[in-house]
Amino acid sequence: MSKVRPYLFYDSAVSVCTTCLMRVEAKILIQDERVYLEKWCPEHGRERVLIADDAAYYRLPARPGSSHRNCHAISRHHSATVVRMTAACVPNTCSMPACR
């Protein structure tokens, strides 16, 4: 019998550990209509960060010329949730004004 998980795996990403800032792999998960970035650092373990509080809005296609889906960083136009940029974005890889 297969195990049913309480979340939907949406995408994979690259992020940074909020403790040591090491580059780590991450998963983008949707659970209870919220979007989370779950990352795992070999030194500091697993961390789950809320990156959007509206999954339906998060799933909308990016506007032409926008690269905010590349780093999944939170900005005021994207979500009411404010997250430390190091929790959601890999420095120097995003073209959003908030990441510069």
Image: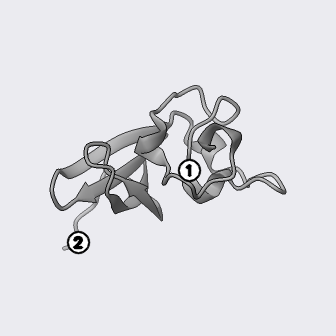
Left/right of residue 73 with respect to residue 40 in the rendered view: right
Give the percent coordinates (x, y) of residue 42: 18, 62
Q: Position of residue 8 (x, y in %)?
A: 42, 57
How many angstroms separate mark 1 from mark 2 (CA)?
30 Å
What SS does tag 1 mark?
loop
Q: Which structural element holds mark 2?
A: loop
Residue at image point 27% right, 61% down? 4
At label 1, the amino acid type is His
Image position, residue 27 (x, y; %): 39, 60
Q: Which residue is mark 1?
A: 72
Q: Nearer the viewer, residue 20 or 78?
A: 20
Q: Going 60% across and 43% down the picture, which residue do you hit?
A: 99
Q: Can residue 35 be seen here?
A: no
State the mark number for residue 47: none
Q: Against 73, is 64 above or below?
A: below
Q: Is residue 51 above or below residue 6?
A: above
Disc 2 marks which residue? 2
Closer mark to the observer between disc 1 and disc 2: 1
Name the residue located 26 percent from the left edge and 48 percent from the top edge. Answer: 20
Which numbered disc flags the more N-terminal residue, 1 or 2?
2
Residue at the limit of the structure toward the bottom, as seen here: 1
